[in-house]
Structure formats: structure tokens, C-alpha cells
Amino acid sequence: MSITPPPTPRRVVFDEPEFSVRTEEPDDLAFAVSRETTLPKPTRTRTLVIANQKGGVGKTTTAVNLATALALGGLSVLVIDLDPQGNASTALGIEHQEGVQGTYEVLTANSPIENLIKPSPESEGLWVLPATIDLAGAEIGLVSTPARESRLLHALRKFKAKYEPDYVFIDCPPSLGLLTLNALVAADEILIPIQCEYYALEGVSQLLRTINLVKGSMNDHLRLSTVLLTMYDGRTRLASQVAAEVRQHFPAETLTAAIPRSVRVSEAPSYGQSVLTYHSASAGAQAYLDAAAELAERGAHLDGQENS
């Protein structure tokens, strides 16, 4: 007996028809977005890994909504889903059931990224490399593989050399295994979401130690560039105290925008959408738009920041 899925709710309607689903074949991928760009382009492709050893801090939510906000601003964005749960794929409207090819094939079979990415219905210029449950066994399968920690790096280098996207976001599982290690080796920057709750900085120190190990042996270019406060509740003294503590620890890296606790942000993934298309007028959507604008502004002056 087949079960009929519930109807998909209607999406937020925009004035311009520019956010329609892309239909190009892989050979015709066009990461140079032709529509009007409202956010500044980075001086080169920015590859950011979204990481935090503490679960439930909003890693996937941040990856999905920042990527969508940047794409809606006219930039070209690729999201690499490296979590076997495939939550980023779900939130961006991409199928990732068993049998769908994606990140697993890139890591284990050297499949080209451009052959496996899918256009997200969230925005033109937004593409996703989906994750399936097969990734859960990838770490075991890669143990005996030469240069196993650099598989994603080599695949991504080839892709960026050919298509030059503006942004690449890598969504990681909440662990320091081989999948996360591949992401840290392939990325140039780390974005850490930190929730404004008790024990907010728990796990960050362990992540920073791992970053230093990776920098010393496998990726000299890796740096912590961005910290984003999530689940901020301005009504509580605790949230303000945590935010102040995070800004004290990471004064230059912490974005001014903070993501509030929002029912709309939590609901959006269940409809296969980002909060930006699910409820564009919500406080969560506006906060992610502000964070994306700030991130893009920093990217426009990236070389100057690194040389300073």
C-alpha cells in the first residue's frame, strides 16, 4: 500500500521571477549569475566549513540559510552536505534517499562534483551536493585509502578551477571524524555557530585544538574567520551574558548580526525550505539576511583582511 505524501505548502511569492529552478545539464553549469547582484562578490571563492563539536547549535540551519541568502543576493553558491543525515539536502529541497549519488561518490569513487550537484529550488545560483546514509560507512571505507583526508580537497579544487563559485559551504556532522577532517582540509575558513545558552563555548576549545593540528600538518591556509551567535533570546540575561562572552573571546570574528530563537526557523526544514522562502518576513529570516550581508561585505575585502 502506497502512502500519499502531504501536499507541499505554497512558497513565498517574490516580485521578480528570478528565483526559478535551474534546469541546465551538468555540462552547462553557469556559476556566473547573470541577474542583478545586490551583495558584493568576494575577491575569490570563499570555502567555509560550518563546524562545532557541540550538537544542536544550528550548524545545518546556518549553512542552509546563509547559502540561500547569498544566492538570493545574486551570488553563486555551492552547499556540500557532508552529514550522513542529509539535513542540509532536505532543507534545500534536494532528494537524498538511498541510491542518490552525491558526496559519498565524490569521496570514495573520485566522481566529479559537477556531475552530481543539483540545483536548489530555493534560489537561482544555489547548488547542492547531496548526502545519503551511505556516508555513514565512508569513514570505515576510507581508512585504507591513500591521502584519505584530502579526497574532498582534490575534488573541490578541480571544481573551483572550472566553475569559480563565489561561496562554498560545507556542512559537517557533529563529530571530529574523517568526514569533518576532509572538510577542514578542503576549506579556507571556518564558521562556528555558537548558541546563546549555558555551556555555549563547550566543545569550541576542542575544535580550536583540532584546527591548530590541521593547520600545522595538512592545511596551512585554514583560519577561523567567522563566529555567528544563534538561538539568541534578548529577553534573558543568560543570552546577553553568553553573547558578551563570545564577543570577548572572538572580537574580530563574531558577526554583529545574531540569530534569534524563532519558530519559523525551526519549521522551515520540515517543508524542504529555508526560512527565507518559508517565511521571509520573520525575525529569523531577517537576521540571516543581515548575517549574509555582513559575511559578503567581509568577503569583498578578504585580501586586505588577510594581509593585515
Image: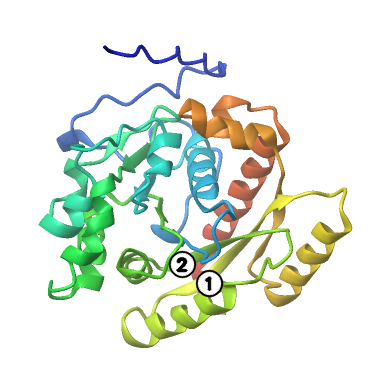
Q: Secondary structure at mark 1?
A: strand
Which three-letter amino acid code belongs to the residue tagged 1? Leu
Which three-letter amino acid code belongs to the residue tagged 2? Glu
* Residue 20 occupies quadrant: top left
Q: Is residue 5 above or below residue 150?
A: above
Q: Position of residue 154 (x, y in %)?
A: 20, 65
Q: Which mark is residue 224?
A: 1
Q: To which residue does mark 2 refer?
A: 189
Q: Report the residue at 54% width, 45% height from top.
A: 61
Q: Report the residue at 49% width, 83% height from top.
A: 209
The numbered mark, 1 or 2, whose residue comes first in the sequence reads 2
Q: Is residue 256 above or below residue 199?
A: above
Q: CA distance from mark 1 to mark 2?
A: 6 Å
Query: Is there a contact, CB below 8 Å, between mark 1 and mark 2?
Result: yes
Q: If the image is split into quadrants, where does the N terminus sit?
A: top left
Q: If the image is split into quadrants, where does the C terminus sit?
A: bottom right
Q: Nearer the viewer, residue 16 or 187?
A: 187
Residue 1 in view in this figure: yes
Q: Nearer the viewer, residue 56 or 217?
A: 56
